[in-house]
Image: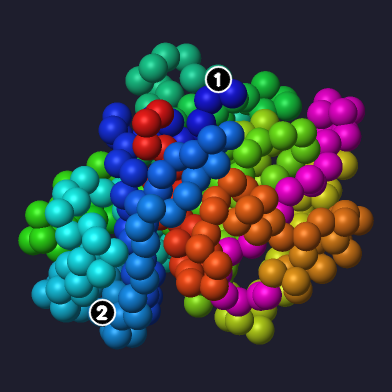
Amino acid sequence: MPNPFSKLIHPWYPATAVGLEKGFASVVHLERGRGNVFALRRAATVDLPEDVIQPSFDDQNISDPTALAMALTDLASSAGLLKQKRWSVSLPEATTRTLILIMESQAGSQSELEEMLNWKMERGFNSSLDELSVSRDKLPSDTQGRDRYIAAAVKRSVREEYETVFGAIGWRVGLLLPRHFGEAQWLIRNGNAGDALLLSFSAGGFTAAVFRNKQPLILRSISCDLDEFEDELYRLLLFYRDRRTSQTDTDGGVSLSRLLVVGEGLTKERASEIVNETLGANLRALNPKDIGLQLPPGQLDFDEIAAPAGLATLSGK
């Protein structure tokens, strides 16, 4: 089964990637080993002043481009990657939006299909397409035979903010994707029987993505306060459970078999507990070794490098 994000990705894939979030940045350079296992050849993280990056879909993100450019230069230097010019980038989750579009009816022509998709994207992203940089790809049809598409968007003005910083330090960026796209690669490339759930937490909420046969089945980004995380996760899991139950006759009773939890908000243990209680499962959150990533002991936080490292696994494909 092909990577569901294949057409959202540019034709070349560097083995180096940078991850950006509010308060920190990370860089990685992966090396593919035997048995499709990856090792960190070089990596580093740095804390950023809280106001340097203010992730937002609609508003300005970078308050001080010069400070961010200097921080990224120092970060690349500390990792021994100062001469590296080709990079993939995972953007903060709040900077981007991703939708799964379901076509309730069949379009009569390509132009009608484009009109329907554009209408759905403008409603879903709550913005005129003229303001957006959008990538989309067709997904397999759902169990009812309806066409599905995945679309990712970032405001053009916001994208230009980041590209201006990268250009100032001489970086050529081939991949510029939402954080959860990078994290999802660890589930997609390690696909097996059953559904896989990614829970990607950040300060303003979380993104939940369910994959079946390496394809996105459910994708939800939920904005909420920290004290609402558990309730919102519970509601999302009930939705998935009800949908799974309604599809039992067509999917052969597929159940959740893998869980990847990334970021701060809920501990991996608490997130696993809620998943198991709600779905009647017996899962633990996957660790780096489970997903094929070798980390030096005690030196790096997987959560801080999961997204850029996931993008870097695409190198050589």
Asked if the magenta segment contains residue 239, the reply would be: no
Magenta part of the chain: 247-267
Q: Residue at x 82, y 68 (%)?
A: 273
Q: Say which residue appears at 54% left-offset and 53% top-offset.
A: 294
Does residue 79 appear anywhere in the picture?
Answer: yes
Q: How crowded is mark 1: few (under 14 residues within 10 Å), some or many (20 or more)?
A: few
Mark 1 and mark 2: Cα distance apart in space: 46 Å
Quarter of the rendering occupied by the N terminus: top right
| Residue shown at the point (50%, 45%) measured from the top left | 38
Q: What residue type is labelled 2?
A: Val
- On the image, the x and y values in percent for residue 272 come to 77, 65
Point out residue 306 in the picture as x, y percentages from the top left corner.
49, 58
Question: In the rendered image, which residue does mark 1 sit on?
Answer: 106
Q: Quadrant of the C terminus?
A: top left
Residue at coordinates 48% horizontally, 69% vertically from top-left?
300
The picture places residue 14, in percent across and down from the top left corner, at: 30, 41
The residue at which mark 2 appears reads as 52
On residue 285, the disc is none
Could you say whether the residue bearing mark 2 is in a helix, strand or loop? loop
Q: Which of marks 1 and 2 is nearer the N terminus?
A: 2
Q: Where is residue 160 in the image (x, y as percent from the top left)?
A: 17, 57
Q: Is residue 213 above or below residue 234?
A: above
Taking depth in this image into account, of 252 and 131 the one nearest to the observer is 252
Q: In this view, does 111 lie to the left or right of 2?
A: left
**Are dots 1 and 2 in contact, CB under 8 Å?**
no
